[in-house]
Image: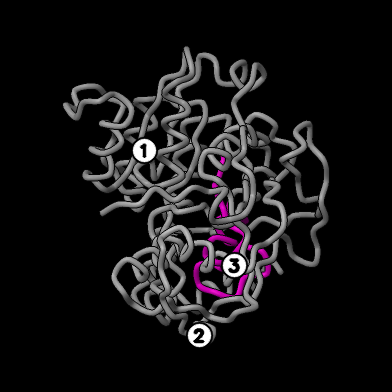
Amino acid sequence: MEYELRYEDITGNPAPTINLDKSDFEFLKGRTVLVTGAGGSIGSRIANHLAQVPDVKLLALDRDENSLHSLSLLISNTALFQEATYVLQDIRDKIGLDKILKHSKPSLIIHCAALKHLSVLENHPREAVLTNVIGTLNLLESAAESDVPHFLNVSTDKAAEPTSILGKSKRIAELLVIHERNFGRKGFTNVRFGNVFNSKGSVIETFQHQILNGASITLTDPGMKRYFMHIDEAAALAIKSSAINAGAIHILDMGEPILMIDIIERLKLALKSNAKIKVTGARQGEKFNEDLMNEFESFGKTTNAKIRTLDANQSGVKLSETPRIDSDLEAINFIGKTLGNVE
């Protein structure tokens, strides 16, 4: 049995009403927009938003054919794949990306493709580097070679003062985008936000599964807090960040962080459960509370009250050539060396 969890019931925050406006439509008009990771939770919402905008040609790229199938059903109620909207492609494959960008000539790329499970990537750091770093590098290089004017990298609050492989790999991705911006590609930028409510693989999904299956609910610590966003709000504000483009990194206003114990109690109430809570202690790489920015960054305003920029002398990172990462140890050393050179 499936249960519809309402954002406002579980987070205690009102459901947001964020929509694209006239300035967003003007920015998007006539563009071909490529969304990577388009089959994922946030990517599919961004793609669906764009599919409703007149005079926009959407290219939805994902490496998972099943995700593209689901997205096609969501947007057009078909899964014939006769149109060129849905592109099966892995961002690790630079040759494939080159062909797609040279043929489609997008004028905006919204880069959502990433590996994002903290614990999984702690155990498999090579995979984090190959997708989150090398995949982003491949896409940036292909974009530069095809003269794509606008590029938005969807990042995470875990990239601020990163302690995990996930956070560190996403921070390097941010820095790669910043390098391109510093060297003349002023339409290239990043957006950071926190947990997207009830997205695929999210902690909400985990808690719900445990409750519905009669298991104990696993919680790191009763005092742990996290930022949460409604998925439609995150999607709309990401698109708006592309249009605003006020700096190297944009931060979405997520309100105050929420105690995870409160999330669990509201879930139990919604699902009519008396499940027990099992405190597990912090996992490797996990923070007690998330940061929105590092010690060198400070908030700046934009034309949208829900979007801020980070004011800092952002240093990019240039990888002179695609590194060969043959083992998890080489991946860890690469991440440490790269971040050590810029921070």
Amino acid type at image mark 1: Asp
Q: Which of marks 1 and 2 is in front?
A: 2
Q: Measured from the top left, where is residue 239 in percent x and y?
A: 57, 33
Residue at mark 3 to residue at mark 1: CA–CA distance? 47 Å
Q: Measured from the top left, where is residue 120 in percent x and y?
A: 38, 73
Amino acid type at image mark 3: Asp
Residue 287, image quadrant: bottom right
Q: Does residue 282 sit above or below 159 in this rendering?
A: below
Label 2 element class:
strand
| Number of residues whose C-alpha sits closer than 10 Å to that of mark 2, classed few (under 14), some (14–19) or many (20 or more) | few
Which stretch is magenta?
Answer: 152-176
Amino acid type at image mark 2: Val
Q: Does residue 26 sit above or below 1 in this rendering?
A: above
Residue 218, image quadrant: bottom left
Q: Is residue 249 visible?
A: no
Magenta stretch contains residue 159: yes
| Number of residues whose C-alpha sits closer than 10 Å to that of mark 1, classed few (under 14), some (14–19) or many (20 or more) | some
Magenta stretch contains residue 143: no
Q: Horizontally, is 12 left or right of 247 in the view?
A: left
Residue at mark 1 to residue at mark 2: CA–CA distance? 48 Å
Q: Which residue is drawn at 75% across and 33% down?
A: 304
The residue beneath circle 2 is 279
The residue beneath circle 3 is 262
The residue beneath circle 1 is 98
Q: Which of marks 3 and 2 is in front?
A: 3
Viewer-closest of 97 and 195: 195
Q: Nearer the viewer, mark 3 or mark 1?
A: 3
Viewer-closest of 39 and 340: 39
Q: How is the image coloured?
A: one colour
Q: Horizontally, is 92 left or right of 154 in the view?
A: left
> Which mark sits nearer the N-terminus, 1 or 2?
1
User: Which quarter of the figure is the C terminus placed in?
Assistant: bottom right
